[in-house]
Amino acid sequence: MENIIEQIRADALAEIENASSAEEIKALSVKYVGRKGLITLFLRNISSLPKEQRPSAGQEANVTKQLVEERIEEALQRIEGLSLNSSDSIDVSLPGRVAIPGILHPISQINQQISNIFKRLGFDIAEGPEIETDYYNFEALNFPKNHPARDMQDTFFVSDDIVLRTHTSPLQIRIMEKTHPPIRVIMPGKVYRCDSDLTHTPMFHQVEGLVVDKNIGFSDLKGVLTTLVHQIFDEEISLRFRPSFFPFTEPSAEVDILCVICRGKGCRVCSQTGWLEVLGSGMVHPAVFENVHYDTSQYSGFAFGMGVERIAMLKYGIDDLRKFFENDFRFLRQF
Ligand code: DAH
């Protein structure tokens, strides 16, 4: 009888020793010490042994059972410890992966902010084609063929007569052709120029504005643009209207803000001038009104256009425009 239990013990210990997975060990536990396990059955059958053999067989079987249970426990711990260190298992002590929610791109944020300011001022919002005819992009805006002002815009030509729009100003013409004054509208969108360096990318965003009505004067232009600049930057910021030239406005003015870096003392960012240019504007040129058959004795208006990336760079103090287009989340999530 003792030979049998000894044999069972030897087999059990050897098999436990050789087992390499938790599943194998659990199967061995069932095989030897489970309800119908070999050691359990042996213990249950002790009563059928001759009386004198029962005590020693019982004792031997109980010691074996305990030993096998201990070895099973040890083997399980050993295997679980191993699997914690192996690379293909799950480490339940690692912190979970956080799903990072997306954010609006800073250019979209500035675009929205500008739209909201103008919505409160009662402006409509309009959009139009990015592939334009020479007529809308230049001719109707009073850039005659061979006019040197065309050189200010490094144009991508699709064909002799078709261009990628170099500015959002052609939308002024499209809107005026379709509607009658009073007009109060802003026109955000992408524009394209053949240019690429720290402060220029081949595609960028502009917001165009147009107001046409009876008795619109330069003071209206100043009022609207002062409100705009104060709301985008801050109420305290100083601005100035500096005479300039655009073919489609007369008089024309560029709007500068006091340099956000040096506060007017002069630094590298403002090229020592103390001022930073933020947008172009002017009273709509009579030649433009004539192109859309508006009666210039009745109506007058003003227009303006600004680069959205430029505003974002000034507002957030960013010195490399290309960062907006690289989509590095470490950069974008700061806004
Ligand atoms: N279209 C001009 C540009 O791309 C910006 C501009 C200047 C727009 C004056 C206007 C304006 O409407 O009145 O540089």
Image (spheres, grey):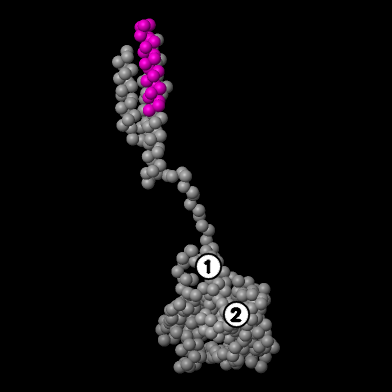
Q: Nearer the viewer, residue 295 or 186?
A: 186
- When the figure is inspected, residue 122 is found, relative to residue 14, above or below; the finding is below
Q: Which mark is residue 263?
A: 2
Along the polypeptide, which appears first: circle 1 or circle 2?
A: 1
Q: Please tell me which residue is depicted at 53% across the width and 58% down the height of the picture.
A: 101
From the image, which quarter does the C terminus lie in?
A: bottom right
Total labels drawn: 2
Residue type beneath disc 1? His
Which residue position is annotated with label 1?
Answer: 105
**Is residue 26 visible from the viewing direction of this image?**
no
Where is residue 291? Give x, y as percent: 56, 90
Q: Is residue 93 left or right of residue 209?
A: left
* Mark 1 residue element: loop
Q: Position of residue 100 (x, y in %)?
A: 51, 57
- Decide: few, some or many residues near mark 1? Use Cα within 10 Å; few <14, some 14-19, many ≥20: some
Q: Secondary structure at mark 2?
A: loop
